[in-house]
């Protein structure tokens, strides 16, 4: 990893040591200007680079043995966990700063050489209580109710037969809209302990 990025990771443990005392940590580290926002972006970049390094090492070291793969995956997860907490922490600080600035200036944008924050207005989310809504629509606005027609394929296979590559009724009538495709048997290679 580049020395500059390694330097950013040096005091990371001090910053997000105790998740329980998040209020104390928030008081100690608060983003108040572009300089501190830039600092947080550099921390996030260094963490992401470290995670990439861990990922590459884990991928290089994996051997074709189940226990070894599980051990390496566990190691990777444990290593990632500490950095994921830091990512969440710095992202929270940046988002908090961004929201505060947006209250002051609705057009505020945060962009530095190390990262940026953007926001996009979302449409309101509609939460449906299907049963109540259907009942109301049946009484007030039927055109908004769809009826979905679909073939019951399981029952169709039970009722009709395949004869000479065609699906036929018990009277011998060919059912339209179905083609039969013969397929080769599957082969499975299994190693037994």
Image (cartoon, rainbow, N blue to C red):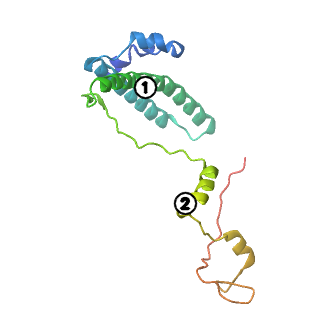
Q: Sort mark 2 into few (<14), some (14-19) or many (20+) by Cα contacts within 10 Å.
A: few
Residue 183 falls left or right of residue 45? right
- Please report whichever mark, 2 or 1, sits nearer to the chain's N-terminal start: 1
Q: Between 44 and 71, which is closer to the camera in this rendering?
A: 44
In the figure, residue 162 lies in which quadrant? Answer: bottom right
| Residue 1 seen in the figure | no
Secondary structure of residue under mark 2: loop
Q: Which residue is mark 2?
A: 141
Residue positioned 61% across, 73% down in the render = 183
Q: Nearer the viewer, mark 2 or mark 1?
A: 2
Residue positioned 47% across, 13% down in the render = 23
Disc 2 to disc 1: CB gap under 8 Å:
no
Q: How far apart are the alpha carbons under marks 2 and 1?
A: 49 Å
Residue 105 falls left or right of residue 46? left
Question: Measured from the top left, where is residue 4 in percent x and y?
Answer: 29, 20
> Vertical placement of 60 versus 153: above or below?
above
Q: Between 158 and 77, which is closer to the camera in this rendering?
A: 158
Q: Which mark is residue 87?
A: 1
Secondary structure of residue under mark 1: helix
Question: Measured from the top left, where is residue 151 in percent x and y?
Answer: 64, 71
| Residue 70 seen in the figure | yes
Residue positioned 41% across, 44% down in the render = 123
> Vertical placement of 39 versus 53: above or below?
above
Q: Between 95 and 186, which is closer to the camera in this rendering?
A: 95
Question: Measured from the top left, where is residue 161 in percent x and y?
Answer: 72, 81
């Amino acid at each position: 990893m580049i020395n500059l990025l390694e330097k950013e990771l040096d005091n990371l443990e001090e910053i997000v040591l105790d998740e329980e005392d998040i209020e104390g940590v928030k008081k100690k580290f608060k983003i108040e200007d572009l300089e501190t926002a830039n600092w947080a972006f550099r921390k996030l970049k260094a963490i992401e680079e470290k995670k990439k390094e861990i990922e590459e090492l884990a991928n290089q070291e994996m051997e074709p043995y189940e226990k070894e793969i599980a051990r390496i995956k566990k190691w990777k997860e444990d290593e990632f966990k500490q950095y994921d907490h830091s990512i969440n922490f710095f992202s929270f600080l940046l988002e908090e700063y961004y929201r505060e600035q947006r209250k002051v200036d609705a057009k505020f944008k945060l962009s530095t050489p190390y990262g940026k924050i953007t926001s996009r207005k979302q449409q309101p989310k509609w939460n449906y209580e299907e049963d109540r809504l259907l009942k109301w629509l049946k009484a007030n606005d039927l055109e908004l109710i769809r009826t979905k027609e679909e073939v019951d394929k399981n029952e169709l296979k039970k009722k009709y037969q395949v004869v000479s590559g065609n699906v036929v009724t018990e009277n011998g009538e060919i059912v339209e809209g179905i083609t039969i495709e013969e397929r080769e048997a599957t082969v499975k290679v299994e190693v037994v302990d």
